[in-house]
Amino acid sequence: MTAVTNQAINSLLAKGVRNIWYPICPSHFLGEKPISLRRLGLKVVLWRDENGAPVMLEDHCPHRGAPLSLGMAMGDRIACGYHGVQVGKDGTVLSVPGAPGSKLEGRKCVKSFPAQERAGVIFAYAGDALHPEPIELQFPEQLVAPEYSAFLCYCEWGGDYRYVYDNVMDPMHGTFLHKQSHSMSLGDTTATFQIRDTPTGFVFEKQGQRNVNFDWTEFLDTGVHWMRLEIPYPATGGPGGNFHIIGAYTPISDKCAAVFHWRCRKVEGWQRDTWRFLYKNRLEARHWAVLEQDRVMLEQFEPDANQRENLYQHDMGVARLRRAFRLKAEAQLKALEAAGQPVQ
């Protein structure tokens, strides 16, 4: 047995730790035909089964390696467009029309991913060899409680997905990068921070300042790696008070990340209709402008920027988050190694 190397840990982190759920794409991406996406270091195919539920497999026909996404979805299976090989939604080859009775039939040859559709997004579970069965998928209250209403904001940013996590775990950048924002122009430009542990993660927060600016952010590990934060809003932003933002980020490649943000507000009745109207007509463009500032900044980071840093007190949250991811990746690889499974 050999020790798990830094290279193996970094390789897993670049693709995303396993044994959790990841958001894959907004629901509207998935229509009548199969689609092909790159996620989690793999090329995957998605389609809807006979009940409209999402299905996700590796986009690779076990016969000759043709992309299954160029084939035909047939409910509980997909037929490869190259030679008609039919693969079920669990990755088992169900039929080889060109060679009936082929040794491929009945074999699970294609990697499959349990999938669910929730909160306007397709989620998939990425398990390793020791944890193929999905864990429970739990959501922050802002995405499930009836008193909240949310809009999904989806985009793709150039660069490593971990830089997106770092960005959200850094409340101080709001005071500087977003200082012209209608919601982040107030508050001190210096702050002392503290870390507060929670049952599902931790909160990184400014001491002595709340409901003024981007004053805290929270990491939650509940089957998905969520980020949660709160932005104060003036009365001109409509009813509902502060915005809650729920984020989750999925690696597409080492040069691209899928970014999911839900903009949530606690509103009911006529106030819900009012704020949703205001959001689409006044606030959404402002939110996109703030996100665009983040995107432009992060896309100009060098790939090794996080190897040449000089962190200080307000970076404690970033350091804690990186350590949490690294420890999880290392533990997964050590468990695979101990079980005699390949460690890549």
Image (spheres, rainbow, N blue to C red):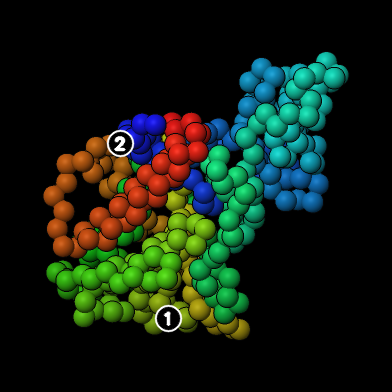
Q: Which amino acid does label 2 sit on?
A: Asn
Query: In terms of secondary structure, where does tag 1 sit?
Result: loop
Q: With 283 as the anchor, is 89 left or right in this view? A: right
Q: Is residue 286 above or below residue 58?
A: below
Quarter in which the N terminus is drawn: top left
Front in this rendered view, residue 321 or 149: 321
Which residue appears at 83% of the width and 15% of the height? 99
Front in this rendered view, residue 296 or 56: 56
Tell me residue 306's x, y (percent).
Answer: 23, 44
Can residue 156 be seen here? The reply is: no
Which residue appears at 17% of the width and 71% of the height? 192
Tell me residue 324's x, y (percent).
Answer: 34, 54
Which residue appears at 55% of the width and 64% of the height? 138
Q: What residue type is labelled 1?
A: Gly
Q: Name the residue under label 1.
A: 241
Residue 102 - label: none
Tell me residue 31's x, y (percent).
Answer: 70, 45
Quarter in which the C terminus is drawn: top left
Q: Is residue 85 above or below residue 6?
A: above
Q: With 37 as the anchor, is 334 left or right in this view? A: left
Which residue appears at 21% of the width and 80% of the height? 208
Chain-order first, disc 1 or disc 2: 2
Q: How crowded is mark 2: few (under 14 residues within 10 Å), some or many (20 or more)?
A: few
Tell me the mark number nearer the camera, choosing from 1 and 2.
2
Q: With 77 as the anchor, is 301 left or right in this view? A: left
Q: In this view, does 134 lie above or below 111?
A: below
Residue 6 - label: 2
Q: In which quarter of the image is residue 175?
A: bottom left
Front in this rendered view, residue 200 or 115: 200
Can residue 147 be seen here? The reply is: yes
Q: In this view, does 202 lie above or below 116?
A: below
Tell me residue 60's x, y (percent).
Answer: 63, 27
